[in-house]
Amino acid sequence: MLDGSSPTIVAVATPPGKGAIAIVRASGPSVLELARRLVQTKSPLRRRVATYARIVDESGDLLDHGLAIFFEAPHSYTGEDMLELQIHGSPVVAREVVRAMLACGAALAEPGEFTRRAFFNGKMGLHAAAAVADLIDAQTRSAARAALANFDSGLAHEVRAVRSALATIVQELEGTIDFPDEVPEPDRGGLKERLAPIRGRLERLRRDGELGKIVREGLGVAIIGPPNAGKSSLLNALLGMQRAIVSEIPGTTRDTIEESVVVDGVPVRLIDTAGIRAHADRLEAQGIARTERALEGAAIALVVLDGSEPPGPGARQLLERTQGRPRIVFLNKADLGTDQAFAEEWPDAIAGSVRDAATLEKLRHAIASAGWNDERFDATRPHLASLYEFEAADAALAALARAGEALDAGEAIDFAATELAHAFSQLGHVSEQVAAEEIVTGIFSRFCIGK
């Protein structure tokens, strides 16, 4: 809980640039004093009522006409007294209103400070605060729905339920350890049966978290292949615009080009790369080196080959190199004829042409299927989102696995109890009952000023 000595903060809450309106937001103990000096109305401000007002500076000079809304603590976004001024969307006017508030003793808000105060004043949990940042950053409807799934602390409720079930088991085992003559050791088979659904719930949260990460951050797809296979043409076709230069001259693409497109509701980062070949000049070799890095960091390798002719050594080397990882093999230039031996050798490949709409639809479907790994993401379910949540869940799952191994090996029940207690402790980081300062700082550092 923040104390009354916290400064009153102010910031513009709307995006930079011109617009119909701009919103200037202030929060803290001096809000009423700011309103008294800078907001002139015919009748006193009423709580949560938009009131027409003249907005003046610290000297009483008119800055703008607008609407003023007062929120009395604790019934506000931050849990403090808040004032919102809706003014004309001129960057100059908004800046002058903020300057006037600073002249009256307010402090400029840091990024995320309004939401940070809401967290410390108990207006929202840590997961809800992180979900606000995810909602602001959302680029697709799926990403927005995923953020809202965690906004109402659904993740915290789910993890608390898991911790509660763990706590019951740990308490029983502690009774056995401390009072062996009075509390018999539980049946180990039955104990493992009780732990199975706990582990299953954590694994589902983690699995949904991985899918949610794809929805939020996008799916990296590296378009790779030999020179002149049609990689840049494919990028342009999937984007629906001429983004990359297309030429019959080998080595035209010397650098990676990254563009985003939405495929099946998922943001996809398409990375066009330089053609990989053994004999390249120094400049082209630098582009190939960047291709190697793009391939290493991508979730999916989209291997584009000229399917109208037998595969050369370079094509076979790419196919061997990408084997065993998520990939899509595209035999391009089918309009020129398809090498039958090549097509029979790679029956799962997509044969077609970048000029064919049906081929492009097949490729989009293949990208979505590879990204989802045949498992659809339910954006309405709570899921892990932050790195610290994944780390805590991984540590808890590892502890549960070690506890199961101890039970199977017939080791003393103390070993299993210790591991289960460790899992319980680690999950405290996810359920907000244990939140390190660096975690809190990391979450709010993602916010823009004014939120």
Image (cartoon, rainbow, N blue to C red):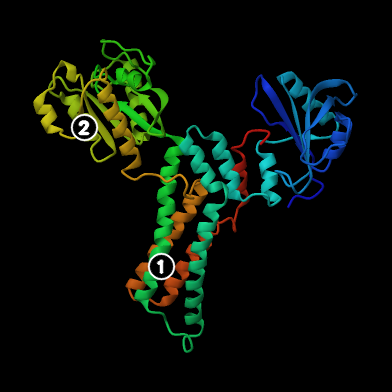
Quadrant placement of the C terminus: top right
- Up-down: is 241 above or below 189? above
User: How many numbered callouts?
Assistant: 2
Q: Earlier in the sequence, mark 2 or mark 1?
A: 1
Residue 195 numbered tag: 1
Q: Is residue 9 left or right of residue 143?
A: right
| Residue drawn at x 50%, y 57% as measured from the top left | 158
| Residue drawn at x 44%, y 43% as measured from the top left | 212
| Residue drawn at x 35%, y 36% as measured from the top left | 299
Going by the picture, which residue comes out furthest to the bottom? 181
Find residue 76 and report its horizontal and vertical position in percent: 73, 44
Secondary structure under tag 1 reads helix
| Residue drawn at x 61%, y 39% as measured from the top left | 445
- Up-down: is 166 above or below 395? below
Find residue 393 and report its horizontal and vertical position in percent: 46, 55
Q: Is residue 430 visible?
A: no
Going by the picture, which residue comes out furthest to the left? 341
Task: Assess whether mark 1 and mark 2 are in contact (beta carbons under 8 angstroms).
Answer: no
Q: Which residue is mark 2?
A: 319
Name the one closer to the observer, 440 or 152: 152
Name the one closer to the observer, 47 or 297: 47
Q: Amino acid at mark 2?
A: Leu
Q: Is residue 366 left or right of residue 155?
A: left
Find residue 138 and report its horizontal and vertical position in percent: 52, 35
Q: Amino acid at mark 1?
A: Leu
